[in-house]
Image (tube, rainbow, N blue to C red):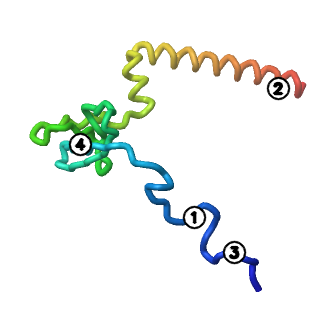
Amino acid sequence: MGSGSAIRGSRVGAGPMGEAERGEAAPRIRVAFYCANKHQVVPSFAHDAQIPDEWDCPRCGFPAGKDPENPPAPPKTEPYKTHLAYVKERRSEADGEAILQEAIAKLRAERAAMSSALKSFTD
């Protein structure tokens, strides 16, 4: 029926680990950070660690600072731009027209070459 002497529901290394087995925990300090949405996050840091000026809020993702009355401003998000919008930023209307005419001329030349090749093939 069974699997020998295995204790059901356990595995090697499982079990309570107390301070005696894993050693003493490093001294910690907790610092409160506040975001623009009035969220508060209190991460803990090692006692001798350098505390950052800003921390990312886990609820909204905005930056959070130590001053609850004056939190950092949320990052400015730009609206989604299409590929065409980026092209219009880089090129003027005249540049676009010149590129279009060049592409049309190239297509017409390729069609003319293909048409003459087909005509000579059928003759």
Q: Which type of secondary structure does the marked residue at label 1 adopt?
A: loop
Q: Which residue is mark 2?
A: 118
Q: Residues within 10 Å of mark 3 (few under 14, many from 20)?
A: few
Label 2 crowd bin: few (<14), some (14–19), many (20+), radius 10 Å: few
Could you tell me how far apart the alpha carbons at marks 1 and 4 are, in whole angstroms? 33 Å
Q: State the residue position of label 3.
A: 6
Q: CA distance from mark 2 to mark 4?
A: 79 Å
Q: Is residue 2 left or right of residue 94?
A: right
101 lies left or right of 44: right
Which element is circle 3 on? loop
- Residue at the spot of label 4: 31
Q: Residue at x 30, y 34 (%)?
A: 78
Disc 3 residue type? Answer: Ala
**If you read the primary sequence from the N terminus, does the residue marked by circle 2 or circle 4 appear first?**
4
Residue under the image location 88 percent in, 25 percent down:
121
Question: How far separated are the C-alphas under marks 2 and 1?
Answer: 78 Å
Going from N to C along the chain, the mark reached first, 2 or 1, is 1
Which residue type carries mark 2? Leu
Q: Residue drawn 75% across and 18% down?
A: 113
- Please tell me which of labels 3 and 1 falls first in the chain: 3
